[in-house]
């Protein structure tokens, strides 16, 4: 029988199996209940205090600066994982470097797929199978990088899409063939206006493409400008049923699509 280990909430559980998931679920429930009416900063501090090995995953996209600024104020050396799909806008790469320096982020870890030339030699896979392109350029490299962490912080918010409408602060993620971990969404209850106000009040630099009509920014080939009145994520995988890149898991399954609400 595997040796008992300690998890963040102090309970003794087996390192793998349903007992591990049950203990994490109990911890997540307690954290959500205790922080129900607290701020994003309180959620971040609680996450850092309760999850031993924690990372923040950031796209350095349109709204990323708000969460990165909060994280820099709470723990400047928090690991920040940045996935370079090698199809990002040049503006995103420059923004990532400049913003990291400005905020004083001390632990940026850049993640790239190792098999791009083998799986997409001509760079056209996104046209034929965008899910497969996202999987090997984003999902697999991220999941491999997260193996050493007990949890990760995201910038997801409820208003962004129907798949995120009931997003909690803390949740248990159970990726297939990987140990369950805690996922933290400090900005879950923020509205678009909250993000804009925070950026303005703290005089934070916006991604340069926002002013050009890109309120949500991913890879260059799969991101288009958004017209006035459109959903902010309408420019992501336009004219397809795809809403998510697939880096998030619910009940052990990748989240890729979902009905709008």
Image (cartoon, grey):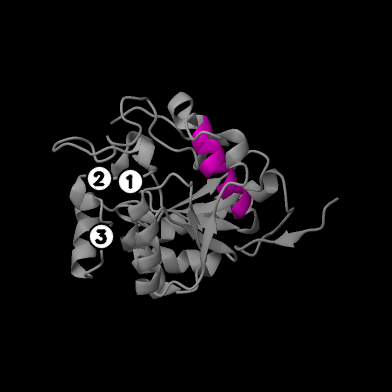
- Residue 217 is marked as 1
Q: Secondary structure at mark 3?
A: loop
Most foreground residue, 28 or 147: 147
Image quadrant in which you'd find residue 6? bottom right
Numbered tag placed on residue 10 in the rendering? none
N-terminal of the pair, mark 3 or mark 1, is 3
Residue at x 53% of width, y 31% of height: 132
Q: Are marks 2 and 3 in contact (CB under 8 Å)?
A: no
Magenta: main secondary structure equals helix
Residue extending furthest toward the front: 122
Image point 45% across, 31% down: which residue?
Answer: 126
Q: Is residue 45 above or below residue 250?
A: below
Of the numbered discs 2 and 3, the one sitting upstream in the chain is: 3
- Mark 3 residue crowding within 10 angstroms, few (<14) / some (14–19) / many (20+): many
Q: Which mark is residue 206?
A: 3
Q: CA distance from mark 1 to mark 2?
A: 6 Å
Which disc number belongs to residue 214? 2
Cα distance between the residues tagged 2 and 3: 11 Å
Q: Position of residue 234 (x, y in %)?
A: 27, 34
Which portion, as a residue range, is magenta?
Answer: 132-145
- Is residue 251 visible in the rendered structure shown here? no
* Label 2 crowd (10 A; few <14 / some 14-19 / many >=20): many
Residue 95 is situated, as x and y percent measured from the top left of the image, at 34, 60
Judging depth in this view, the residue of 166 and 216 nearest the camera is 216
CA–CA distance between discs 3 and 1?
A: 12 Å
Q: Is residue 163 above or below residue 46?
A: above
């Amino acid at each position: 029988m595997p040796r008992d280990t300690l998890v963040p909430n102090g309970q003794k559980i087996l390192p793998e199996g349903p007992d591990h998931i049950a203990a994490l679920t109990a911890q997540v429930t307690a954290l959500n209940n205790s922080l129900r009416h607290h701020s994003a900063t309180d959620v971040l501090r609680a996450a850092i205090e309760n999850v031993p090995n924690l990372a923040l995953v950031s796209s350095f996209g349109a709204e990323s600066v708000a969460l990165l600024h909060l994280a820099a104020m709470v723990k400047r050396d928090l690991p920040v994982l940045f996935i370079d799909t090698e199809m990002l806008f040049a503006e995103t790469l420059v923004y990532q470097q400049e913003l990291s320096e400005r905020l004083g982020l001390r632990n940026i870890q850049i993640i790239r797929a190792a098999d791009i030339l083998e799986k997409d030699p001509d760079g056209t896979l996104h046209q034929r199978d965008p899910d497969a392109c996202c999987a090997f350029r984003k999902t697999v490299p991220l999941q491999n990088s997260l193996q050493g962490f007990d949890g990760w912080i995201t910038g997801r918010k409820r208003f962004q899409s129907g798949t995120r409408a009931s997003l909690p602060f803390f949740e248990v993620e159970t990726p297939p063939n990987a140990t369950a971990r805690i996922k933290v969404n400090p900005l879950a209850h923020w509205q678009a206006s909250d993000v804009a106000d925070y950026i303005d009040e703290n005089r934070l630099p916006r991604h340069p493409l926002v002013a050009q009509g890109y309120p949500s920014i991913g890879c260059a080939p799969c991101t288009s400008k958004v017209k006035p009145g459109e959903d902010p994520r309408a420019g992501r995988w336009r004219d397809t049923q795809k809403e998510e890149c697939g880096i998030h898991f619910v009940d052990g399954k990748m989240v890729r699509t979902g009905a709008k609400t």
